[in-house]
Each structure stands twice: as C-alpha cells, then as structure tokens.
Image (cartoon, rainbow, N blue to C red):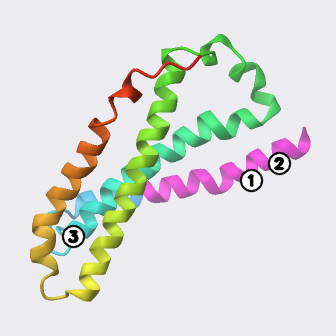
Amino acid sequence: MNCELFLLALSLMYGIPSLALYVVILVQIIRNKHDKRFNRPFYRLCFLIGLVDCVVYLIIYIFFTLPIYSMFSSFYGSALFFPSPFTTAVYFSTYLFTYLQLFGNCFLTLNRFTCIVFPLKHNRIWRACFPISIFATHLRTASSPHLYRLSIE
C-alpha cells in the first residue's frame, strides 16, 4: 500500500503541474490571438491540440490510471462502471480524443514541414489547408457512426 501511495503521489506531482502549465500556455495563446504573430495556423493548431491533450490526460488518468491502484478498487468496482451508457461514453470519448490527438499532430507536422520546405508559400498554403484540416478531421469523426451506437457488454 505504501508503494502504491508513493507512485500515486509521484504521478500527481508531475501530472497536475504539467496540466496546469499546459492550461497557462493555452490561456496565453488565447490572450494573444489578436497579435499578428500569434494569429497563425501553427498557434491555432497548437491550441486545438492542447485542448485535446488536456482532455485526454484527464480521461486516461481518471478512467485508466486510477483504477490500477487498489485504494480505488471499491469506487471503480461499483455499478457506475459496469457496462452502461456511461462506460460506452467513456470508451467512445477515449477513442475520439485519441484520434483527434493523432490527426492534430499529423497536421502540426505537416504545418512545420511546409514552413521549412516552402517558406515563401507557407502562409498561402495554410490559409487554404487549415480549414481543410479541420473539415477532414470532423468528416472522419462523423464517418464512424457505429461508435455512437456502441454498447459495451
């Protein structure tokens, strides 16, 4: 039990400050969005990926990391976590936000690639590509209706 408590405290000691720092970064991006330097597709992508990263961290920590510790076994063994619409929503949101993380990181990589390879055309390329990237991500998400009806039994 003492080892578990130590590991839990250790994960919270780096997890909570990291999440708080991430939120501060997101607030700074929002606060400076009217500044010409921060009104670029790179910062918009960073903001969107940052939101998704924060949500994924919370979902993974609450629903997948904490159940590992025996001190929470009575809570996670309760009827709330039996197959139900709630657990379906948890698994669906885990899939969805992890997918959004993956797509966001791919588009961020593509953004940095075009910045290096096409420095003079980068702004023009991303003026068109940013809305396309958002649309493509949502289109792919919407094309998985079977996940909305998923029932875990």
Determine whether 140 is above or below 47 in the image.
Answer: above
Residue 148 place in picture, x, y as percent: 37, 25
Q: Residue at x 28, y 61 (%)?
A: 45
Disc assigned to residue 1: none
Give the amino acid at mark 2. Answer: Phe
Quadrant for the C terminus, please: top right
Which residues, given as a range, are shown in magenta?
Answer: 1-23
Quadrant for the N terminus, please: top right
Task: For residue 27, say whether it is visible.
Answer: no
Local crowd size for mark 1, using a 10 Å CA cut-off: few (<14), some (14–19), many (≥20): few
Residue 51 place in picture, x, y as percent: 37, 50
Residue 35 position by quadrant: bottom left
Give the amino acid at mark 3. Answer: Phe
Residue 117 position by quadrant: bottom left
Q: Rounded to the nearest whole Å, what is the CA distance between mark 3 and mark 1?
A: 35 Å
Residue 71 place in picture, x, y as percent: 80, 29
Label 2, on which residue? 6
Q: Residue at x 45, y 52 (%)?
A: 53
Q: Is residue 136 magenta?
A: no
Disc assigned to residue 10: 1
Q: Is residue 16 magenta?
A: yes
Residue 50 place in picture, x, y as percent: 39, 56
Mark 3 lies on a secondary structure that is loop
Label 3, on which residue? 38
Q: Nearer the viewer, residue 117 or 27?
A: 117
